[in-house]
Amino acid sequence: MRVFRGLPASAGTPVALTIGNFDGVHRGHQAMLSRLMEAADDLALPAAVLTFDPHPREFFAHASAPPRLSTLRAKLERFAAYGVERTYVARFDARLAGISAEEFIEHVLVRRLGVRWVLVGEDFRFGKGRAGDLTTLRAAASSFSVEALRTVAIAGERASSSAIRAALMAGDLERATALLGRPYTISGRVIHGQKLGRNLGFPTANIPLRRAPPISGIFAVRVHGLGAAPRVGVASLGVRPTVKAGADPLLEVYVFDFDESIYGRRVMVEFLHKLRDEAHYPDLEALTRQIRADVAQARDFFAARG
């Protein structure tokens, strides 16, 4: 997959395109990508995605913007897995936010991307002040065709990034997994930490987080990237109130029955079941007792799953 940072000055080969933020690449997004691939194959056009970074809500209200479900890298990896040939990552800034719906169609979609077929959600809005909608897009589509995909519902609930965030914040990983179509994951490179876990008898892989995630607490997890098969363990995700006041969020993973040096290794952690919330303990001895209980509970969880 070719990734374009920004929009090309002019269109080259015409494309079949879908547009969106695709935060989390959940089951609604997956339906869009599947339909994109079908249409691109039927029309003999490259399958392309137009997405935005930062998220528009981060641009307009950074302080109150919701946490992201996925990094840009994770989104691109999912696009590539579907067979998308091109992804255009448009920087969402004041210039892009200020263009009218008509300008977006003519200057972005037609002149710079060369769309021949475009797929959007039925609630798609675009242009300055979100003035453009599906009707606006279809009315101006003289050189390309427009298709809208209906909302995808799972067990009666709309698959949306907002619904997934709400499920994660509530600790309902089963509901989040159903809406995502897979477990919620965080990926990153293992760094050196304070070695506190090792001193307590539970060495952890420490993964720094660029942004605060939509979940926190103690979890039973599955870890990819440590060998041919995934491994299981228990993870702490949060600010470690017993260890340090005012710390940045950190993901710490204790991998069961594993003792290898993995500093610098990129891993992906799947969150399968929430054990409890973070808590402050009076001393390290009390914290160690709780970690032992967490490990036992996580082992029981995996044993019950077979």
Image: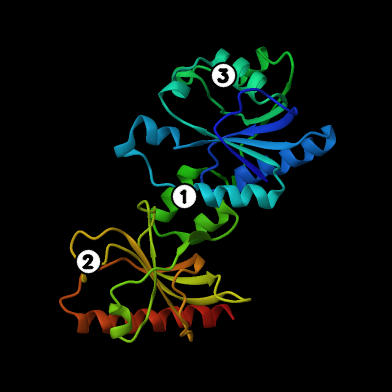
Please, what is the three-letter code of the amino acid marked with disc 1? Leu
Please, what is the three-letter code of the amino acid marked with disc 3? Phe
**Image location (x, y in percent) of residue 40:** 78, 36
Q: Horizontal placement of 278 versus 144: left or right?
A: left
**C-alpha span from label 3 to label 1:** 27 Å
On screen, residue 68 above or below 229:
above
The answer to which of marks 1 and 2 sits earlier in the sequence is 1
Q: Residue at x 73, y 30 (%)?
A: 15
**Image location (x, y in percent) of residue 283:** 17, 79
Please, what is the three-letter code of the amino acid marked with disc 2? Pro
Q: Mark 3 points at which residue?
A: 104
Q: Horizontal placement of 147 versus 159: left or right?
A: right
**C-alpha span from label 2 to label 3:** 47 Å
Q: Mark 2: few, some, or many residues within 10 Å (few <14, many ≥20)?
A: few
Q: Mark 1: few, some, or many residues within 10 Å (few <14, many ≥20)?
A: many
Between marks 3 and 1 in the image, the one whose residue lies nearer the viewer: 3
Q: Residue 241 carries which label?
A: 2
- Does the rendering let one see residue 217? no
| Residues under numbered marks 2 and 3 in contact, where contact means CB atoms less than 8 Å apart | no
| Residues under numbered marks 3 and 1 in contact, where contact means CB atoms less than 8 Å apart | no
Which image quarter is the C terminus in? bottom right
Q: Which residue is drawn at 67% across and 19% down?
A: 110
**Image location (x, y in percent) of residue 92:** 46, 30
On screen, residue 133 above or below 179:
above
Give residue 146's quadrant in the image.
Answer: top right
Using the image as rendered, state which of residue 13 and residue 39 is in the foreground. Answer: 13
